[in-house]
Amino acid sequence: MIELPSLKELLDAGAHFGHKKERSYPKAKQYTYMLKDQIYVIDLEKTREKLEEALKYIEKMATEGKALLIVGTKRQAQELVAQYAKAADLPYISYRWLGGMLTNFETIRRRIKFLDELDGKLSEENLQSLTKKEKAKLQEEANKLHKVFDGIRNLKKLPDALFIVDVVGEKIAICEAQKMDIPVIGIADTNANPELIQYPIPANDDAKKTIEIILALVSKAYQEGAKKMKVDKGEKLEKKDEKSVEVVRKGDKGVGAVKQEE
């Protein structure tokens, strides 16, 4: 099991800072400890509890070979999302969520195919056939598409779940996930409705240190699950090979028995 951060580590990362009372969602109150100077303080015991639930779910997903899409487009999350998603070989969106990313997935795949073709046109072999102006125009278009699609270029089908850094900021992604019946795990600050997602993790979604702690654990949980899946597959293959050898042995005995009878 993944080791959870201590209360002190979460405290030092600023995970307990919520929003002002007037900006907080009523249902988020269940995850708060107190109201101090009109600002909600998140109960870090509950943060650890909900984080543990989410990590178990993510690890189980990985053991089943399911895809988790990590989404975080706010400034302080972008680099971290890319870093920890790549570490676990997971798809990610860190620049901008395009409408229809889930609900119109086939169109998104066509745009990615177009990007592949564009990269082909810009390859060294084809550069000589392009004018300087044409090359600049194509390169500009390719750069824009890379920002949006690089993290999901290998995503061939809809993800099995989403991990969201900011529940309020990524409301379009959550709305699309609901329409497609895709479960969502996410960091839910006090300004978010925790009931919008299946696995809310109550924490400060503005603090970079908090985001990093949680993303690192998400990445590690998925990697651990993926390792277990490989081990299980290896054991199944070994058992299959053993059965095959046993069948062959039995077959050999049968042949020998026939020869003896002859």
Image (tube, grey):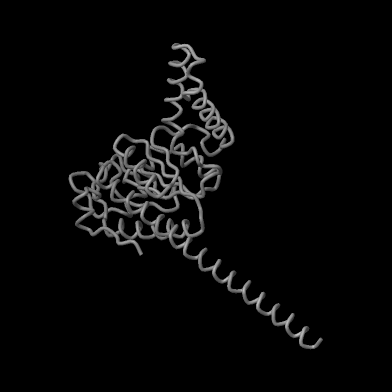
- Of all residues shown, which one is farthest toward the bottom? 261
Instruction: Please give the name of the residue rendered at 32% of the width and 38% of the height, measured from the top-left corner.
Output: 79
Q: x, y percentage for residue 249?
A: 65, 78
* Looking at the image, residue 102 lies above or below residue 48: above
Q: x, y percentage for residue 211?
A: 30, 46
* Quadrant of the frame with the C terminus: bottom right
| Image quadrant assignment for residue 258 | bottom right
Q: x, y percentage for residue 200?
A: 39, 51
- Residues 14 and 107: in front is 107
* Quadrant of the frame with the N terminus: bottom left
- Residues 206 and 63: in front is 63
- Of all residues shown, which one is farthest toward the right? 262
* Looking at the image, residue 228 lies above or below residue 164: below
Instruction: Please give the name of the residue rendered at 26% of the width and 52% of the height, measured from the top-left corner.
Output: 42
Q: x, y percentage for residue 193?
A: 39, 46
- Residues 20 and 110: in front is 110
